[in-house]
């Protein structure tokens, strides 16, 4: 009998084909605890071991699958892995290719909730500074929910009761199941693109934690946080709290409560309008009364009843003012004229020109007058200013004696 000798690669390939052809090994659910774990920084693939008290098995979860995990895997977590048994040919290593990883045991959803909440809070998605006020009287309201759910029925009922004139725009979305998160996020983006809505209601009626989980998915929460239109989150009942509630501008306990917060009560609006109208009428009546009283007062003025009397009265006053001005000018002008004459005569007597007209002269040197003989030197030239004209002279002799002695020039 001939012996068939296989290469290592052939052996590994054969074993791998046998494993993958076994239908019982192609769809496995394996419960265990995550042991060692690494993430390939370049590819994003997740490599880990699943173990129990007696054994362990290598596992790999490719990035296309691990990026959809609801929680952050870490060593020590009890999980259930869905996938297929296979062989990594290069190393001949038996491993499990994981397509889905779920937390095992009670509190699994709670752990996933807290992990994502912590992550998004650190990124500022839940900050109160981001919250915007809800419009007081919106004319158009967007709704993101299931078209067949009780939430839509409740919202429509509240709208018909409170204010039928408000326009409701439904962006239908799946609110439960694998595709719900993407569906809700897409509906929110659709209403933002449409642009008519002034506020958006996002939510659904009550259910189990698993039923409401779409509103705890990262894609849904980010869509709520990034909406350019204010969002009211209304998920489940009053005791249900979702991550969308934290990201929304306002949380409502139920879809009905959300509708009551968003839709103004028409009766209250009409009452407010009537009150404002009454206040406006009172103010107008008061203002008209004041103007009427002022008009009546003006109508009693003599000038309106007897214009001639008013004109004659003012003519008399004008005559009085003219007479006063005439009397004032008749006595004041001569007095002022006499004062002016006296001051002119005084100025004339003090004028150098007046002195020169009486036969005197003024001696100057370089434009400066000479006051004393001791300022003169024999032989220097001076300028004499006379009543008519000037003359250039030379000093021949200087006499500093007092009296009426003549100075020869």
Image: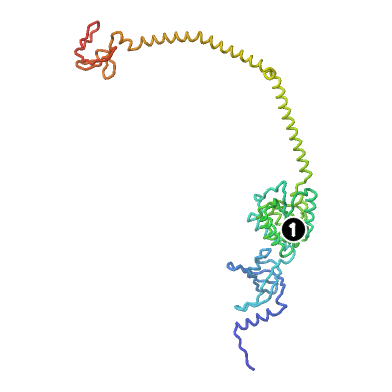
* Image spot of residue 312 (x, y percent): 64, 14
Image quadrant assignment for residue 315: top right
**In screen coordinates, is 175 left or right of 40?**
right
Q: Which residue is mark 1?
A: 145
Which residue is drawn at the image coordinates 73% and 30% (left, top)? 286
**Residue that extends furthest to the front in the rendered view of this protein:** 308
Image quadrant assignment for residue 382: top left
Q: Give above or below for 34 relative to 367.
A: below
Which residue is drawn at the image coordinates 70% and 47% (left, top)? 135
**Residue that extends furthest to the top in the rendered view of this protein:** 404
Q: Give above or below for 92 relative to 211.
A: below
* Image spot of residue 369 (x, y percent): 29, 16
In the rendered image, the quadrant that contains the C terminus is top left
Which residue is drawn at the image coordinates 62% and 83% (left, top)? 11
**In screen coordinates, is 336 left or right of 148?**
left
Residues 401 and 76: in front is 401
Q: Give above or below for 243 relative to 52.
A: above
Residues 81 and 193: in front is 193
* Image spot of residue 341 (x, y percent): 42, 9
Q: Secondary structure at mark 1?
A: strand
Q: Give above or below for 4 relative to 286.
A: below
**In screen coordinates, is 190 left or right of 361?**
right
């Amino acid at each position: 009998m001939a012996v068939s000798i296989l290469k290592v690669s052939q052996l590994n390939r054969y074993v791998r084909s046998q494993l993958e052809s076994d239908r019982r090994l192609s769809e496995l659910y394996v419960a265990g605890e995550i042991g060692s774990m690494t993430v390939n920084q370049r590819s994003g693939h997740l490599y880990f071991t699943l173990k129990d008290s007696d054994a362990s098995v290598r596992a790999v979860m490719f990035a296309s699958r691990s990026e959809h995990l609801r929680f952050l895997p870490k060593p020590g977590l009890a999980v259930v892995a869905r996938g297929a048994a296979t062989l990594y040919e290069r190393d001949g290593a038996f491993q499990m290719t994981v397509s889905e990883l779920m937390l095992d045991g009670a509190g699994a959803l709670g752990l996933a909730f807290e992990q994502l909440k912590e992550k998004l809070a650190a990124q500022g998605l839940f900050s109160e500074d981001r919250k915007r006020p809800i419009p007081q009287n919106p004319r158009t309201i967007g709704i993101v929910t299931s078209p067949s759910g009780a939430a839509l029925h409740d919202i429509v009922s509240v709208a018909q009761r409170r204010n039928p004139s408000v326009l409701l725009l439904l962006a239908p979305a799946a609110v439960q199941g694998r595709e719900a998160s993407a569906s809700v996020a897409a509906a929110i983006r659709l209403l933002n693109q449409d642009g008519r809505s002034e506020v958006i209601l996002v939510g659904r009626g009550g259910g189990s934690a698993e039923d409401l989980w779409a509103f705890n998915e990262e894609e849904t929460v980010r869509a709520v946080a990034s909406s350019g239109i204010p969002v009211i989150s209304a998920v489940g009942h009053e005791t249900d709290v979702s991550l969308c509630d934290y990201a929304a501008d306002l949380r409502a306990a139920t879809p009905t409560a959300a509708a009551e917060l968003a839709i103004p009560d028409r009766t209250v609006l009409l009452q407010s309008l009537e009150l404002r109208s009454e206040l406006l009428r009172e103010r107008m009546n008061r203002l008209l009364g004041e103007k009427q009283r002022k008009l009546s007062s003006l109508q009693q003025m003599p000038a309106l009843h007897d214009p001639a009397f008013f004109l004659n009265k003012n003519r008399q006053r004008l005559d009085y003012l003219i007479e006063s001005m005439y009397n004032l000018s008749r006595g004041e002008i001569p007095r002022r004229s006499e004062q002016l004459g006296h001051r002119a005569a005084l100025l004339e007597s003090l004028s150098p020109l007046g002195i020169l007209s009486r036969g005197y002269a003024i001696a100057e040197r370089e434009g400066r007058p000479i006051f004393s003989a001791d300022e003169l030197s024999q032989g220097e030239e001076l300028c004499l200013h006379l009543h008519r004209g000037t003359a250039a002279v030379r000093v021949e002799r200087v006499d500093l004696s007092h009296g009426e002695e003549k100075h020869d020039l």
